[in-house]
Amino acid sequence: MNDPVIFERHFSDKLGISLEIPQTWQKIEKQYLDEQTEGYFYPAQLVHNPQIFIKKIVVPDAEQHEQNFVELADELMQLPLQKLQPEEFEIITQTQTKVDNYPAILDIFVFQSPDVELPITQYQVCWQNHQTVYGLIAMVESTEELQYLPIFAAVAGSIHCEQ
């Protein structure tokens, strides 16, 4: 993937967003995902191909508040920690950002799960558009992170929430 990356815009009626995905990436077939998730992968001939997932969660009125996206970010970060020892998990960055002018949290961390022989770098962004919370989760083998983290950032930066 040393050639320039060409992105094309995808519209998701299911998620209510549009985003730009590299042309060479393939959509993950819906039978492998729940109805509120879309995914893409790059067939890189790696043990674990780079992947991007976007999940939509509609928050019930009784649970809705301005920090639901922060709670989702914390939950997503806790998932790999449940199976790991502290030395198998390293936070690279945690920062506040924006997705389509909505407040967002960006987390990048590396983990090595016992069931995976290679360290994985996870890039995740969570944001909230009124009652809807979104999480973008992208993963790649850590040896390939320098090549793919800019792609993950470009995809996250291209997201537009439909009103």
Image (spheres, helix red, strand yellow):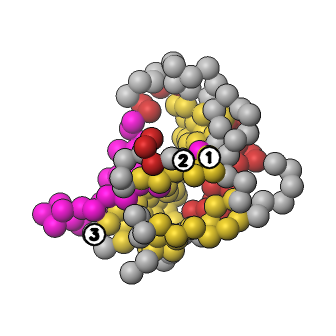
Dot placed on the residue nearer the N-terminal end, 3 or 1: 1
Nearest to N terminus: mark 2 or mark 1: 2
- The dot on residue 97 is none
**Quarter occupied by residue 157:** bottom right
Closer to the N terminus: mark 3 or mark 2?
Answer: 2
- For marks 2 and 1, give the one nearer the viewer: 2
| Residue 20 drawn above or below residue 79 | below
* Residue 35 place in picture, x, y as percent: 36, 53
The local crowd at label 2, few if under 14, some if 14 to 19, many if 20 or more residues have their Cα within 10 Å, is some
Residue at x 71% of width, y 32% of height: 46
- The amino acid at mark 3 is Gln
Residue at 69% in and 59% down: 22
Q: Residue at x 51, y 74 (%)?
A: 160
Disc 3 versus disc 2: distance between alpha carbons?
26 Å
The residue singled out by tag 1 in the image is: 41
* Residue that label 3 marks: 131
Q: Does the magenta stretch include residue 11?
A: no
Please identify the residue farthest to the right as the structure is shown: 3
Residue 4 can be seen in this image:
yes
Q: Is label 3 in a helix, a strand or a loop?
A: loop
The reply to whether the C-beta atoms of the residues labelled 2 and 1 are less than 8 Å apart is yes
Bounds of the magenta segment: 51-79
Question: Real-space Cα distance between discs 2 and 1?
Answer: 7 Å
Foreground: disc 3 or disc 2:
2
Q: Which residue is drawn at 56% across and 26% down?
A: 112
Mark 2, residue position: 28
Q: Position of residue 88 (x, y in %)?
A: 53, 25
Of the pair 112 and 28, the residue shown nearer to us? 28
Q: Is mark 1 on a helix, strand or loop?
A: strand
Furthest-left residue in view? 62
Q: Amino acid under label 2?
A: Ile
Residue 67 in magenta? yes
